[in-house]
Amino acid sequence: MPANIVNKPLRDMKPVEIIFEVTEAHEGGYDARALGHSIFTQGEDWNDLKEMARDAVRCHFEGDTAPRVIRLRLARQESMGL
């Protein structure tokens, strides 16, 4: 094993990406919840949500421990009768 690789517990490793599940809010706009992290944010529109997600991730992680990629997955749920 190369000398520069250290065996770190998984919890100490920097995540490569963070994924938010996004839903449309009843009041309008979007709600986003990070999978595997205690991060929740909202945005009035899609562009606002992207900025709010970036800000929430920066606030949640310290220094350079934040993931480099943020993914937003829009989950849509619809009920319909026959």
Image (tube, helix red, strand yellow):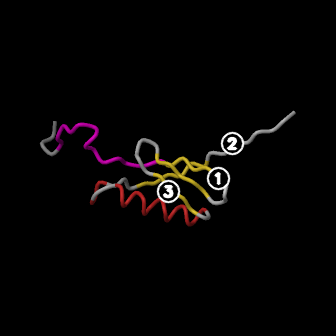
Instruction: Say which amino acid is labelled 2.
Output: Gln
Q: Which residue is mark 2?
A: 77
Position of the C terminus, as image quadrant, is top right
Estimate how packed mark 3 is, as few (under 14), some (14 to 19) or many (20 or more) residues with alpha carbons within 10 Å.
many
Which residues fall within the magenta stretch?
5-19
User: Residue 64: x and y, percent?
Assistant: 28, 58
Disc 1 crowd, CA 10 A, few/some/many (<14, 14-19, 20+):
some
Image side of residue 23 versus residue 2, left or right: right
Q: Position of residue 12 (x, y in %)?
A: 25, 43
Structural crowding at the residue carrying mark 2, measured as other residues with C-alpha within 10 Å and reported as few (<14), some (14–19) or many (≥20): few
N-terminal-most mark, 2 or 3: 3
Q: Residue drawn 36% across and 60% down? A: 59
Label 1 vs label 2: CA separation? 9 Å
Mark 1 / mark 3, whichever is N-terminal: 1
* Front residue of 8 and 20: 20
Q: Residue at x 57, y 50 (%)?
A: 22
- Measure the alpha-carbon separation of dots 2 and 3: 19 Å
- x and y, in percent, of residue 81 in the image: 84, 35
Q: Residue 25: horizontal and vertical position, in percent?
A: 63, 54
Residue 54 is one of the magenta-drawn residues: no
Seen at 42% across and 41% down, the residue is 36
Q: How many marks?
A: 3
The residue where tag 1 is placed is 24
The reply, left or right, for residue 45 in relation to residue 5 is right
Specify the principal SS of the magenta part.
Answer: loop
Residue in the foreground of this view, choosing between 1 and 37: 37
The residue that label 3 is drawn on is: 41
Which residue is located at x 15 percent, y 40 percent? 2
